[in-house]
Image: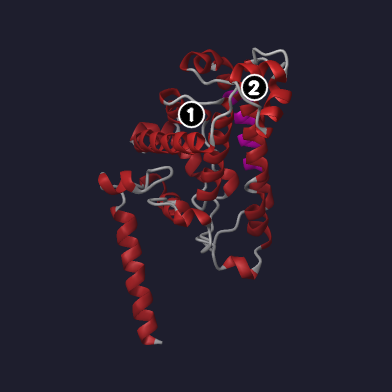
Amino acid sequence: MLPFQSMGEAEAALGRNLSAAEVMWFQYSAGMHDFWLYAHNIAFLILIYSLAPLPVALVELFRPKTIHKYKLQPKVHHPASTVLQCYKNVVHTFIFAVGPLQLFSYPIIEWVGIRTGLPLPTGWEVAAQLVVYFVVEDYFNYWIHRWLHGEWGYENIHRVHHEFTAPIGFAAPYAHWAEVLILGFPAFLGPAIVPGHIVTFWLWMVLRHVEAIETHCGYDFSQTPTKYIPFYGGAEYHDYHHYVGGKSHSNFASVFTYCDYIYGTDKGYRYQKEHLAKLREKWKQMT
């Protein structure tokens, strides 16, 4: 909750006029307790999860010829009933597992110093913190994901996520409730190390889920903006991991590719790409 009774008092404390964004933030959050601002995360998760995968899900259902050529596993098509059941399961996990965890973790958010007041962070501050959050989450997610592919971790937890050998956007967070909670740790670690504003925290959660949905969408669109991000894995990279399934020892990273390269867990993927490239070249020569 903001410690100011009016915008004039806030401007006096800051020694300047409020920006347009800060005026909007004051009007929205002035009388709202920090707990409820933090609780926005649950609504954001469900909203983003419901909307972001929808365009590609419609493509998966109706299979327009102009987009079908980008499908990574063209022989696999999920019926609407499968997509709907996946959606129901994920929303259930969000409400009954992620929701309580987020609410009970509010004291930790306060303790690490994620703030809700004025001034709002600058664009450069937000960008720098988001880079840290992505790198930290990616590194620790990599090791947890590798552990989940061990015999016990896979059989008892991770196999649920791999029920989709050909992933779809709605299946990005489809997993055992324990896995969803475990992988929440690296997502919170970055903001704990470099705490910022609650708005940055919201943006981080939204972008991370959009990234996961894009990675699981099952299509490798040639003009995807994320292809210009250095070391970014993307849909093709992670689709291979699901295609191989439980025995996969490749492509564990959640966002970037450098961990798999450094620790040698992308060899199967690179071998397959090289092999397919040779087959395509041979086919061109024959035709």
Q: Callout 1, which amino acid?
A: Gly
- For the residue carrying disc 2, how many other residues have a C-alpha within 10 Å: few (<14), some (14-19), or many (20+)? some
Which span is picked out in magenta? 85-98
- Against 95, is 50 above or below? below
In the displayed structure, would residue 159 be above or below residue 60?
Answer: above
**Residue picked out by circle 1:** 184
Badge 1 or badge 2: first in the primary sequence: 2
Q: How many discs mark residues in the rendered view?
A: 2
In magenta segment, residue 188: no
What element does badge 1 sit on? helix
Q: Quadrant of the N terminus?
A: top right
Q: In this view, does 227 lie to the left or right of 272?
A: right
Image coordinates for residue 95, horizontal then vertical, percent: 64, 26
Visible in this render: residue 117?
no
Q: In this rendering, which labeled residue sits more in front, label 1 or label 2?
A: 2
| Image side of residue 72 versus residue 31, left or right | left
In the visual, does 64 lie left or right of 144?
Answer: right
Q: Main secondary structure of the magenta part?
A: helix
Question: Of the residues shown, which amino acid type is indicated by label 2?
Answer: Leu
Estimate how packed mark 1 is, as few (under 14), some (14 to 19) or many (20 or more) residues with alpha carbons within 10 Å: some
- Residue sticking out furthest to the bottom: 287
Quarter-of-image position of residue 143 = top left
Rendered location of residue 209, percent (x, y): 55, 40
